[in-house]
């Protein structure tokens, strides 16, 4: 007999924009999970593609279309969350692929503890993942699970708040109690929510037994822009991030990454690691000080110009 948590109602929520083949694989794999999924909510940003055929193929798939100018990283997910009355809400990005039929079963297990608000999965690199990004996945998503609470702030620093909506399960009761995802946020809605939960006495589970395949081979410019947006989200919330340094964790990644590349016989990659890290830091630094930048420069630095057109 499966544990009681597996009889709780589970809904999955996936924001979708210009879906590629991995999105369809994701839906197929979700339908084969050991824990039944009541509904798969697709929040489809209208892009000219018709997903009605997919919705007709699966009885438990619900399709909601939204206009591109209405999409918001936190607001769109929150809209879907409030459309559901499930006990557990599982969020995916459209390019994450479950590894194994027991992903959901493993992911929701930590939520048996009523003080655990979020459980997020381990991300494994794709086959085409570049060596440095492959190490970053290993660094950020280790083999060992960990429950994080406010007591870990001194040891982990900003990593205490780290969470990822690439694949994460939420106790819906706590989700509503804490207030849901931040609306009108450029990025980082998952980390902002995790931070608020931890500050209110709840815990966040990094659940390494739950695995998804997900990675990107970003260019240096894309990394710059992503780090710019991450820093903007932190600068907008000093009540959470004030006094908690992010740079220390970045330095630790660079040092351990360089050692890894040397030990594995790739010394020529160390320079690329240093250059890429410098580009990331430059993006992060500028994002921290975005209020001092002219609008034109902000639009050059961001991955999400539509966000700025809404808020400026």
Image: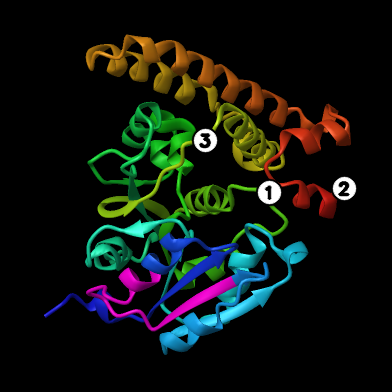
Q: Looking at the picture, how far across and down is residue 218, in whole percent?
A: 52, 35
Number of marks drawn = 3
Q: Which residues are magenta?
A: 27-43
Q: Which is more toward the observer, 153 or 224?
A: 224
Residue placed under numbered mark 3 in the picture? 218
Q: Is residue 227 left or right of residue 133?
A: right
Mark 2 or 3, nearer chain start? 3
Give the quarter of the image for residue 126: top left
What residue is rendered at 57% in x and 32% in y? 223
Q: Residue furthest left?
A: 1
User: Which residue is labeled 2 in the image?
Assistant: 312
Query: Residue 99, image x and y in percent?
Result: 26, 57
Left or right: 100, with 42 as reference point: left
Q: Secondary structure at mark 1?
A: loop
Which numbered circle lies on residue 252? none
Crowding around mark 2 (Cα neighbors within 10 Å: few <14, some 14 to 19, many 20+) is few
Residue 91, x across and y down, in percent: 46, 64
> CA gap, disc 2 to disc 3?
27 Å
Q: Is residue 113 magenta?
A: no
Quick check: is 32 in the magenta stretch?
yes
Q: Is residue 119 above or below residue 61?
A: above
Q: Quadrant of residue 264?
A: top left
Image mark for residue 186 = 1
Residue under the point 58% across and 66% down: 77
**Residue plotted at (69% across, 73% down):** 66
Residue 162 in view here: yes
92 with respect to 77 (left or right): left
């Amino acid at each position: 007999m499966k544990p009681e948590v597996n009889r709780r109602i589970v809904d999955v929520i996936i924001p979708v924009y210009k879906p590629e083949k991995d999105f369809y694989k994701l839906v197929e794999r979700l339908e084969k999970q050991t824990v039944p999924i009541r509904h798969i909510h697709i929040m489809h940003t209208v892009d000219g593609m018709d997903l009605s055929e997919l919705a007709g193929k699966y009885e438990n798939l619900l399709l909601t279309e939204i206009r591109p100018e209405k999409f918001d990283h936190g607001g769109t997910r929150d809209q879907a969350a409030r459309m559901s009355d499930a006990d557990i809400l599982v969020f995916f990005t459209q390019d994450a692929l479950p590894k194994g039929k027991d992903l959901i079963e493993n992911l929701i297990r930590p939520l048996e503890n009523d003080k655990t608000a979020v459980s997020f999965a381990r991300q494994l690199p794709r086959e085409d993942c570049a060596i440095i990004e492959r190490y970053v996945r290993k660094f950020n998503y280790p083999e060992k699970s960990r429950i994080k609470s406010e007591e870990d702030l001194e040891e982990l620093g900003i990593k205490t708040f780290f969470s990822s909506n690439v694949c994460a399960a939420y106790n819906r009761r706590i989700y509503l109690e804490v207030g849901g995802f931040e609306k009108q946020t450029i990025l980082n809605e998952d980390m902002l929510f995790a931070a608020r939960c931890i500050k209110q006495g709840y815990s966040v589970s990094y659940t390494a037994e739950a695995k998804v395949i997900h990675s990107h081979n970003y260019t240096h410019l894309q990394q710059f822009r992503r780090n710019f947006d991450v820093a903007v989200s932190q600068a907008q919330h000093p009540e959470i991030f004030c006094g908690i340094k992010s740079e220390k964790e970045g330095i630790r990644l660079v040092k351990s990454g360089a050692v890894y590349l040397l030990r594995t016989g790739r010394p020529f990659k160390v320079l690329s690691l240093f250059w890429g890290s410098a580009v990331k830091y430059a993006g992060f630094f500028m994002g921290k000080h975005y209020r001092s930048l002219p609008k034109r420069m902000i639009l050059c630095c961001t991955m999400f110009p539509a966000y700025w057109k809404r808020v400026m």
